[in-house]
Image (spheres, rainbow, N blue to C red):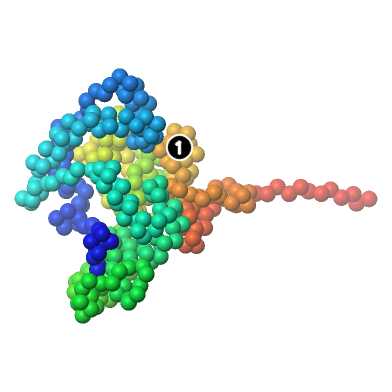
Amino acid sequence: MFIILDLDMLVCARTAPQNSFRNPVERIMSIINLSLQAIGIMREKMSPDMEKLFESVSTMKDARAIAEKNPGLKQAIVESTEPVRDMLNMLLQRLSLKNEPFSTVQPATDLEVEEMWNLILIVDKTITMTDTTKVKLQTKTDLLAFMGHCCVSRHYFFTVKKCGVEGCTLCKKPRLPAEVFSQLNNFPDPVLDSTGEHYKPFSEVYGSETDESARPSLKVSRTTGHGMPFTPNAENTRGVVKCLDCNKPRTVHSQRALSAENNRQMAALKEEAMYTCGIAWIPEAHPLRDICFVSRALSCATAVEVYYFSARMKSRVLTVLPLVCWKCGETDTLPIPREKLEQFQSIHPVCQVCKAAGVEERTRVKRKIKRRREETDEN
């Protein structure tokens, strides 16, 4: 949008719906559930050949992989789910929050996606549609140059602004008059006032240099205890839930093994109630309220827990606990150096981005090296 409209500045930000900062997830989901109650796992039946292909699909990743080899499957799935999507759109559009009606949008078409990629190629011609991860984009020098020159990326907002320098090769000349453009400043981060309990008004911080040090989700949790009636460890880890803000996996604990019904309830809960570090994830009236727990002492600044990696060694949870960077939770991790494997019993990997920032692998329990005693003949 910034490039195609030749904008001088663009700010994209996300906020809590209707300024409901207290618990935005539950506020909005309780309303959406009114429509979701009428929707089940349903679709129109496809042709016998397509149904046979679809039998082996368990995730969207599987569906995409099969669709690449069988182009007709994608269109068949779209047509099969169209009646349900139309029904869901109709039901959601009947809802409202504080007298504001809900609106729905259609997903991007293949043509629109292709047009978007063509715009990205204006910035960096080497980018392909498979370059969708942070690790891959770190190798795109032209994109990194543009991001470093024109963009300010934060957790809750993203700013793109022309530099205004005559003859710049990375961005165009501003369209606004020079006296107006000179008054444009980057969108500021939240800044605490002298009390440390409230944030300064926008008018006081606009135009000043700010950073993310006062970001709400980076605050260290004031909760000293984990809030569980038992001690969390690898033995009582039953699953994982991802934080909506930092995307780090957080372990779910229970004193006893979960039944099949409990596992179904947890799977449904992950779909209905999004999780943020430090909040009470499970609603009071939920059947799992007094069975499953997530530590309340966590914040988005907290690294992935040590017992997350310990629990991975157990076959029953290995499939739901992928190997991640211990610092940021990224799934694309670097190979662990051989010398560290020889020195330590447990090593938690890092991703390429964290490694470049100076973060090293987290090591636990140094191996005891058995030294061969040399017997000498005193005689």
Picture quadrant where residue 11 is located: bottom left
Q: Position of residue 328 (x, y in %)?
A: 41, 54
Which sits in the foreground, 205 or 152? 152
Q: Residue furthest bottom?
A: 179
Q: Residues within 10 Å of mark 1 (few under 14, many from 20)?
A: some
What residue lies at 54% left-to-right and 53% top-to-bottom? 363
Q: Residue furthest right?
A: 379
Which sits in the foreground, 378 or 294? 294
What residue lies at 40% left-to-right and 46% top-to-bottom? 130
Question: In this rendering, does residue 239 appear at all?
Answer: yes
Q: Position of residue 35 (x, y in %)?
A: 14, 37
Under mark 1, the amino acid is Leu
Picture quadrant where residue 290 is located: top left
Quadrant into which the N terminus falls: bottom left
Above or below 179: residue 352: above
What residue lies at 36% left-to-right and 36% top-to-bottom? 64
Question: In this rendering, does residue 30 appear at all?
Answer: no
In the image, taking residue 327 as reference, residue 14 lies left or right, namely left
Q: Residue furthest left?
A: 99
Which sits in the foreground, 242 or 156? 156
Secondary structure of the residue carrying tag 1 is helix
In the image, taking residue 267 as reference, residue 91 lies left or right, namely left
What residue lies at 44% left-to-right and 58% top-to-bottom? 140
Q: Position of residue 231 (x, y in %)?
A: 40, 45
Q: Which residue is mark 1?
A: 318
Picture quadrant where residue 251 is located: top left
Q: Position of residue 180 (x, y in %)?
A: 20, 77
The image shows a total of numbered marks equal to 1
